[in-house]
Amino acid sequence: MNKYKVALVHNIIAPYRVPLFEALARHPAIDLQVYYCAKTHKNRRWDVLESNAYSYTVLPGIALEVAGIAYHINPSILTRLATNRYDCIILGGSADFTTQFSFFISNALKLPVILWSEMFERGEGSLAKFVAPLTRFFIRNADALIVPGSRSRDFHIKRGAAPERVFIAPNTINNDAFFAKSSAFKQREEQLKDDLHLGNNTIVLFVGELNERKGVRSLLRAFTKLKSEREITALVVIGDGELKSELIQLVSNESMTHITFTGWISDEEKIKYYAIADLFVLPTLYDLCPLVLNEAMACGLPIITTTAAGCASDMIVEGENGFIVEPQNEDALREAILRIVQDDELRQKMGKKSYEILTTRFSLDNAVNGFVDAIQFACDSASSQ
C-alpha cells in the first residue's frame, strides 16, 4: 500500500473535526499534517481540543472579521508547502485567503489539490457568493473534491466538477460516545426531568445558535399552535446568540407556555437533554451540514428539519425517522411535530431508525474512506500525467 504525505489546511481547531483528523492520521496510507489558520473564532464558545494523536500547526497570521465571518491570512503557508515535499494538499473550503493562496502555490509546485467543500445549491452564504467565481475555478480545476453528501455532490458537479473526481465523506461525530452517554442518562430519565423542572411532558428539543438563520421564531410559533392540541408537550431551546433576548421577549409578549431557554451549556449537560428528549427539531433557514442532527440521531431521536439543511435528504428517510419541511412553514412544522409527539409507537420506531441510519451511513470509517479514496485518486491521476 502506498503511503501519501498529505497537508490539510483548515480554518480553526473545531472539536468536531478532531476525531476525523485523528482517524486519518491512524490510517496506514496517510501521513497527515494539519495546518490551522487560527485556534478559534471570537464567537465560538467551545473548548479548543488539543490532541497528540495527529500532527498539527497553528499558523501565524491575522483574521479579518466582517459581520461575524473571518477571512484568514497566513502567508507562512507558502514556506510550509514549498519545503515539505507533500504528495497532495487538501483545502478546507475556498473562502479564505490562506486556502486561495494555497491553491495557486500548489499549482505552481505541481502538487495535486483536493478541495473539501460542504456547499450546496441553496446553502451559499454571503462570503461564498462574493468569492463564487474563484470557487468555480477551484471546483473545475481541483484534482479531486471531497463533499459531505449527495446534495453537495450534485452542486459541485453542476459547477463544473467531473463526476469521477467527487468523493463523499460524510460529516461525523463520535457516535459511540454520544450513544453511550445518552443511554446512561436515560436510565435516570424521570429524575432528570424532575431536576430540570420538565415534569412528565413530551420534550421537543432545539440545539443551536440563536440567530436569524436557525429559524427559531418559526419553531416557537409552531409549538404554540401545537399546544392547543397536545397540552403535555414542552419545548427546550438550548443555545445562545444575538436573538436570545428577543426570542425570550417574544415568548413573554405572546404568553407562550412550556418553553425553556437554557442558554449555552456544556456538552455533558447537552447530552442530558438529548437523553430525555422525545424529538429533535432544527427549523433552519440555511445550514450546510449541521452536526446537531448527528448528535440527536446518535441519541436515538426522531428528527425534523427543513429543505434548507444541506444534509437533510441523506439523513432523513421521510416518515421513517423524521420529516423534512419547507423553511418558515409554521403549519407544516406544527403538523410534523404533532404526528410524532402524539404517537408513542411511531416515535420509538423513528428513534431506532435514526440510530440505524447514522451508524450505517455516517460513521467515522465512512468519512475516512472517502478521504482516502480522494487522496489516492488525486495522487494517482497526477502521477499518470
Image (cartoon, rainbow, N blue to C red):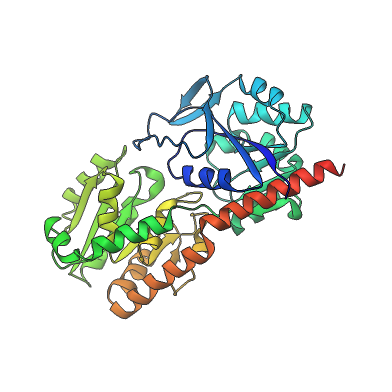
Placement of 4 over or under 217, stated as above or below: above
Q: Residue 173 placed where, x, y %? A: 45, 52
Q: Nearer the viewer, residue 360 or 281?
A: 360
**For residue 232, what is the image quadrant?**
bottom left
Q: Nearer the viewer, residue 253 or 116?
A: 116
Q: Residue at x 37, y 33 (%)?
A: 43
Is residue 322 at least partly visible in the picture? no
The image shows a total of numbered marks equal to: 0
Placement of 207 over or under 281, stated as above or below: above
Quadrant in the picture for the C terminus: top right
Q: Nearer the viewer, residue 140 or 182?
A: 182
Q: Residue at x 56, y 46 (%)?
A: 26
Residue 351 falls left or right of residue 21: left
Is residue 235 at least partly visible in the picture? yes
Residue 115 falls left or right of residue 327: right
Q: Nearer the viewer, residue 357 or 156?
A: 357
Q: Residue 381 placed where, x, y %? A: 81, 46
Furthest residue in direction right, as rendered: 385
Q: Residue at x 72, y 26 (%)?
A: 105
**For residue 324, what is the image quadrant?**
bottom left
Q: Residue 313 placed where, x, y %? A: 53, 63
Q: Residue 3 placed where, x, y %? A: 70, 43
**For residue 220, what is the image quadrant?**
bottom left
Residue 94 falls left or right of residue 336: right
Furthest residue in direction bottom, as rendered: 345
